[in-house]
Image: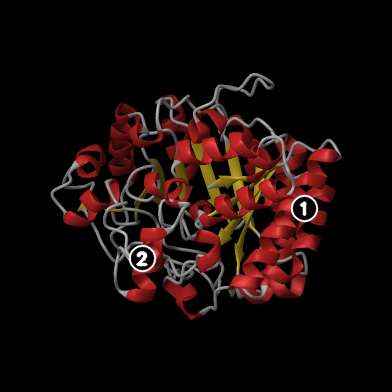
Amino acid sequence: MIDISVLYCGLETPSTPHRYGRAITQIDPPDHQRMRLAKSASERRPIVVWNLTRTCNLKCQHCYTDSANRRYEGELTTEQCRTVLDDLAQFQVPAVLFSGGEPLSRPDVLELAAYARSKGLHVVLSTNGTLIDRKTAERLKELQFAYVGISLDSAFPEVHDQFRGVKGAFERTMRGFRHCVEVGQKVGLRLTLTRETCENLDRIFDLIEREGINRACFYHLCPSGRGKDLYRMDPEQSRRAMDTIFDRTRQLNENGNRVEILTVDNHCDGAYLHQRMIEENHPRAQQVREMLEWNGGARYSSGVGISNIDFNGNVHSDQFSMYRTFGNVLDRPFSEIWQDTSNEVMAGLKERLGLLNGRCQECKYLNLCGGGLRARAEVVTGDPWAADPGCYLSDAEIAR
């Protein structure tokens, strides 16, 4: 994740200590939102993206799990999930993100969240928002979810419904946002950047401001699941999208709106932001370079600072890499699987810089980008150490 609001605008957020190793001094977030101060990026425990269920009430075009509105066999029981949560708490992971499918379609998800909170775990929900009524929003707030991330593909109802495959999804999702805002539950918007969705980002920012949404994450597409058939943005589209995100983040900050804006799954965004700050003679350009290098970008992401447990308990380096499993939590604890480097890919992910090839080898931003998303590189090229095809910087820009 590249935190644009922190880097470009100097905003402090509850995640700043974890993401950039800096204590927060300007804000005092509640304990259930505050993340621990990391000594170094390489020593961070992984945030766990846990796909609790594959069942989903929508049919999204870009679903990386290819989920449908039906029951799937082999999902972990409530007691098995509790055992996993015991291990995650003992391993001191910084956060557990309950995802799916649609996690709220699983009857025991709030029971599991309550158990996770009783163990002191930082809990996040990733949802399509359509099942969040007022009562559910109040329960999410009561359970102290650090935040609730709701997916939205467009500010235009017909475009969102087309992506989601269900007519009326937009209105139900917006009700989910509004219920969270009304009860004071921190809520974030999540949007996957594609050739279609990148064309209405200004409208998305208008919606964020109008609806009082606290946070927004813009995800670069990884062509997995049903998303394999969608087209990524070309370099020029990527740059225009980032420029819009940078411009509107700055405007939000200048207007006094403390909205957290992040981009996800393409760490060359950090390099592009740094270039822009140098061109603008931004007074914090050097400090931002240092923060990005401390974070390490993708170097300390998938396989190090990001992990995934799928519906059946299989452990992956991230949620887009379900084609490779390192073990199952029903056979061994997650903590043991995660620290086992006998698999050459897991070992490589933890020390990847010397394995990267192609454009990454000569890139002057390697220490702050870390080589981009390995899943996208492998899905597109077949090589887990190839240059990330999502990088939109030119050869001239990355030359040492």
Asked which quadrant contains residue 186, the reply is top right
Secondary structure beneath label 2: loop
Camera-nearest label, 1 or 2: 1
Name of the residue lying farthest toward the front: 400
Colour pattern: secondary structure
User: What residue would you read off at disc 2?
Assistant: 72
Residue name at image x 68 percent, y 52 percent: 276
How far separated are the C-alphas under marks 1 and 2? 43 Å
Amino acid found under the numbered disc labelled 1: Asp
Residue 367 higher or lower than 100, as above or below: above
Q: Is residue 357 left or right of residue 54?
A: left
Is residue 221 at least partly visible in the picture? no
Residue name at image x 63 percent, y 52 percent: 275
User: Which dot marks residue 356?
Assistant: none
Is residue 273 at least partly visible in the picture? yes
Residue name at image x 63 percent, y 34 percent: 141
Name of the residue lying farthest toward the left: 342
Number of marks in picture: 2
Residue 184 location (% of width, % of height): 72, 34
Secondary structure beneath label 1: helix
**20 or 113: nearer the eye?**
20
Mark 1 and 2 residues: CB-CB less than 8 Å, in contact? no
Q: How crowded is the residue under tag 1: few (<14 C-alpha within 10 Å), some, or many (20+)?
A: few
**250 or 179: nearer the eye?**
250
Q: Is residue 165 left or right of residue 208?
A: left
Residue 255 location (% of width, % of height): 86, 40
Residue 83 location (% of width, % of height): 28, 36
User: What residue would you read off at disc 1?
Assistant: 247
Q: How crowded is the residue under tag 2: few (<14 C-alpha within 10 Å), some, or many (20+)?
A: few
Residue 63 higher or lower than 95, as above or below: below
Residue 5 location (% of width, % of height): 68, 41
Amino acid found under the numbered disc labelled 2: Tyr
